Amino acid sequence: MKARTRKRLRGLAIGVAALAALAALAFAIAFFYYDREVAQQFEGRRWTVPAKVYAAPIELYVGLPFTIDDFLAELERLKYRAATELDRPGSYRRRRGRFEIAVRAARFADELRPAQIIAVTIEGNAISGLRAADGADIPVFRLDPLLIGSIFPIHGEDRIVLTPDDVPPLLPAAIKAVEDRKFDTHHGIDLEAIARALWVNLRAGKVEQGGSTLTQQLVKSYFLDGRRTLGRKLEEAMMALALEARYDKRDLMTAYINEIYLGQQGDRAIHGFGLASQFWFAKPLDELDLPELALLVAIVRGPPYYDPRRFPDRARKRRDLVLRVLAQQGIVSGEAAAAAAQAPLGVAARPSGGYYPAYLDFVRRTLRRDYKEADLTEAGLSVFTSFDPRAQLAAERAIETELARLDRTRPPPAGKSGLEGAAIVTLPQSGEVIAMVGGRNVNFDGLNRALASPRAIGSLVKPFVYLAAIESGRWNATSVLDDTPIEVPLSKGKVWRPQNYSRYANGPVSMVRALSESLNLATVHLGLDVGVAKVAQMFGRFGLDATPAPLPSLLLGAIDLPPIDVAQLYNGLANGGFHVPLRAVRAVVDAQGERLGAYPVKIAPVAAPDAVYQVDRMMTYVIARGTGRAAAARLPRGLIVAGKTGSSSDLRDGWFAGFSGTHLAVVWIGYDDNRPTGVTGSSGSLIVWQKIMSALDTTSWQPPMPESLEDMAIDYASGLRVTTGCSQDEVVVAVPRGTPTPYMAGCAPPSGIVDWLRGIIR
Amino acid sequence: MQRVVLTISLALALGACATAPYEPAAPVRPSAPGAAPGEAGVSQSPASPNPASPAPVPEPVPAPRSHRLGAATSALVTQARSASAQGDFDAAAATLERALRIEPDNPLVWIEMGRMRLASGDAAQAQYMGRRALALAAGAPREQSASWRLIAEALRARGRNAEAQEAARRADELAVP
């Protein structure tokens, strides 16, 4: 009996031992598997330094227009702090218009600029002095380039990656106190916490408390979906153990701070405390105070549930709980916690600023042509762009306010989305894109309409019809066009009967009037006479990849283009007939500061400069008295600009494209589903355009007139020549020298001259 | 079907045209030398075709324009020249573009950029930049002359000697003694 028992026991022991060995083996295999999995993922992320994208630095020089307020705003944007002593880089002090600035060291594409102290004097709204610390004049000085974003592998996800040095020490302490008190000592899982959570949840009959360590939370965010099953939990625990075995606590904490999910905006997931700080408070993490940090830590538990914008009461309760825990744990004093609990939530009204998805999309598309995705997302490149935060802000504000106003005046039907819009601003001479808005929700990384929404451009075609005509030498601004009904036979016996927007035919009109008032009939007559193929070629010459089919309807803009293509076409007009490929990227520099790629300006003459000048001059009358005149009174006084309205059939699209001497802006407004808007290019888009132009520091369009041309005063309606002061309706156009133009009746100089002129004309 | 083929081949033909940059067949002569006095290279206010207007006010002939670089641009040009001399054309180009952003309409900046491109071996860009400078230099004979000079050198580098000669002749004509 004894022997049998012993035998049985021995059998049992062997069985248990075998089972244990088996379990250990299974554990070892599983551990090995997860360890590899985890290591791969974690290394991939930990050593990933995404390409950093920088705005154009501001170039300071004597004579540059700058008000004291704007300069202060610029220092603020670059996070310079007012101080009494210039003790460290990144500080400045001011006495009236004199600034002393301790400039940080900064990397540019072509140099590493050491930290130094400079003095900037502003007098009469311009920089009047720029000196080094030793008093020597500095001819030109670049402020730090502003970091505007990073390039990440996953669409709709961006992050501000922090190193341990960037993190205020209070944050990891607070995270540990609230989420995982044993973080410093456990090996990935905290059995005690799990048991406690189990007990609490059993008593409550539902899941009230989680027992996950920070490591487990990190694993969940890295590798696993949100399902809560026992299998998942085991997998998560294995991975957490594997992570802990490989990496030290400091690395894990940094990874957690950069990884954890803290908010949602549409498709855009907000990961990491760096970005979350911008998202919720619109300022960098190291500027947050105790109640703000506590709120971020509170949100960790459930970003949608504790969303402080949607559920402020809930969020506040949990923030105050966090503050109490911090006091209990001795991380902050009881008084500090109590004072912090009195503070408002301090959440920024909406996530804004510092996120420019449309522009970053443009940058990324450029880089993808030349770099491998892995290089962009991992190799720590620096990308220097032509982005101008001030122009961007102006464009965003103009789109937002005007679309909101239009939606109020003509609300979209129930269930339909509101108007959308896009805008692009360029520097015509260099082809640099300085601002881009891809939709009215400017911070939303969704459809980038500026690049990806081809829409009918309508009358934006017309300047190219007139350019083809003038270049042929058979027409000029004084030529009389035929604004009368026309029937154009198409294939299969169909007939095209275009109409003017007013439905009214004006008879004979001057070319300058036909363009200014966007007369369709006159343009169709002209375009057919010039030749549709010549007009179509013009688009190829000005930079379209594919020359459009030479169909008569092209003359009235039956061609779908995204705003970026329109900007490319009009950039050539703004740049005197020279094509410059639009670009956002100036240079790419690797982690060691070596220049990898440069994108220098490239230029090609695409049209006769004197022909382009004549068309541009006519386009100034679009604003002065044509379809763009609503903008004239609102633009800065005396600013000469040229442009063109465009509206597609049934007003599905409203466009305005126009330029000053130093800026080109293109604006589109319409519905995403292409239904009619009831808004012409001369209302919505023109107003946005005018607001953008007014906000920029821009100069008049007044290039030197080509010597082959001369000014001529004509009667606006008839195109007949007048002596100054004779016609009520006089405009001055540019025509080729010696263009024979008859005088208007009663407006001719004394007869001797008329006879003399007749002699010339014959 | 035939029409489709026709349309496609037409589109292809047009596309082919599209890639070629616009270039005047030969250097154009907007103002023939030896024509009306005062026409050679100096931009006029509207030429007065009414010599006996009621109150004969003589049209003021504007003095020839001339361009100079501002202090900031000038410093950048100097910096670019030294980078260019060391063969660092990327850096020189980047520095000249800083100058271009400060004075985008100054023909001297474009001439400088063109010269740098010529030195780096990009004669086509040099020629086009010369053209750009020329357009911006209307009414300024000294800068027109310098633009033609650049164009001439670029054309010569491209082996287009006849055109280069013509451009050089225009440069000489406009040269201010």
Image (spheres, rainbow, N blue to C red):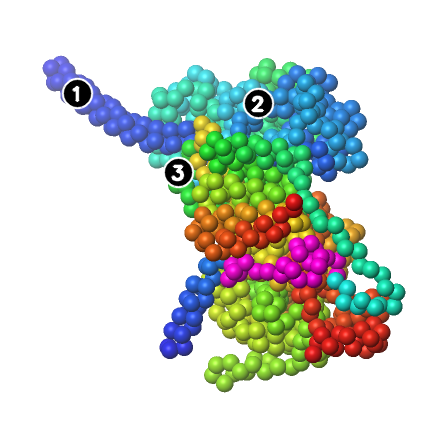
Distance, label 3 to label 1, CA atoms, is 53 Å
Q: Nearer the viewer, mark 1 or mark 2?
A: 2
Assign a secondary structure to mark 1: helix
Q: Which residues are magenta?
A: B23-46
Magenta residues, dominant SS class: loop
Residue B163 seen from this side: yes
**Badge number at residue A464:** none
Structural crowding at the residue carrying mark 2, measured as other residues with C-alpha within 10 Å and reported as few (<14), some (14–19) or many (≥20): few
Position of residue A495 relative to residue A210, above or below, is below
Residue beneath label 3, please? A374
Quick check: is B36 in the magenta stretch? yes
Along the viewing direction, whichever of A118 and A457 lies nearer the viewer: A118
Q: Tag 2: residue type? A: Pro
Amino acid type shown at disc 1: Ile
The percent position of residue A548, horizontal first and vertical second, equals 49, 66
Residue A667: x and y, percent?
Answer: 63, 56
User: Residue at left 58%, top 33%?
Assistant: B78
